[in-house]
Image (spheres, rainbow, N blue to C red):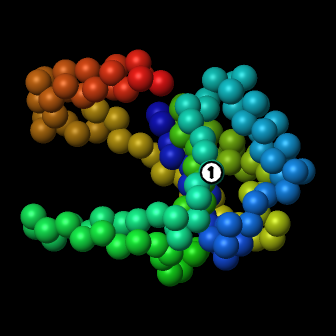
Amino acid sequence: MRFMVLVKANEETEAGVMPSEDLLAAMGKYNEEMVKAGVLLAGEGLQPSSKGARVKFSGRERTVVDGPFAEAKELVAGFWLIQVKSKEEAIEWVKRCPNPMEGESEIEVRQVFEAEDFGEELTPELREQEERIRAQAEANQ
């Protein structure tokens, strides 16, 4: 099972305040633990929303809205993609994480859809396409 672990943004991350050396070291140690355990697939911090954009869809129309975006607590400051046996194991890994902020923070844990979750709608042809895309993406890394 794969889980996306989302670190929620706050006013400091949205202002571009960088983490302290101590926090960077603690996060590096935590990431090393996950790599050694074979659960970490990816993980990164994200630039503030002021450096981002959103693309809104309405039928065939596309509208680009540049950041920053309101409500920092609804934004993502960073993420991990992990592979574990259960939601409970994912939560246990997150509980071991150093607090990603100086004060209060929140981390969200969301399961990633797997091919089998889509049932019959994912035809053998679509399943083959999905596998081919994944293999190509991995080769590009």
The answer to which image quadrant residue 63 occupies is: bottom left
> Residue 69 appears at what percent x and percent y?
48, 76
Furthest residue in direction bottom, as rendered: 70
From this viewpoint, which residue is outermost toward the right?
Answer: 22
Q: Nearer the viewer, residue 124 or 117?
A: 124
Left or right of 135, for residue 3: right
Query: Visible in this render: residue 75?
Result: no
Identify whether 18 is placed above or below 98.
below
Residue to which mark 1 is pinned: 45
Tell me, yes or no, if residue 106 can be seen here: yes
Residue 135 is drawn in which quadrant? top left
Residue occupying image coordinates x 57% and y 75%: 72
Mark 1, other Cα within 10 Å: few <14 / some 14–19 / many ≥20: few
- Quadrant of the rendered structure where residue 35 is? top right
> Which of 45 and 83 lies nearest the eye of the viewer?
45
Asked whether, in this view, residue 7 is left or right of residue 139, the answer is right
Image position, residue 100 (x, y; %): 74, 57
Residue at x 54% of width, y 40% of height: 81
Q: Residue at x 62, y 71 (%)?
A: 14
Q: Establish if 86 lies above or below 76.
A: above
* Amino acid, disc 1: Gly
**Residue 108: where, in percent of width, then height?**
57, 58
Per the image, label 1 sits on a secondary structure element best described as: strand
Residue 38 in percent (x, y) is at 64, 23
At a point 72% along the width and 36% down the height, the residue shown is 31
- Residue 114 versus residue 63 in the image, above or below: above
Query: Which residue is nearer to you in this view: 102 or 12?
Result: 12
Q: Is residue 20 left or right of residue 34?
A: right
In this figure, what is the number of numbered marks?
1
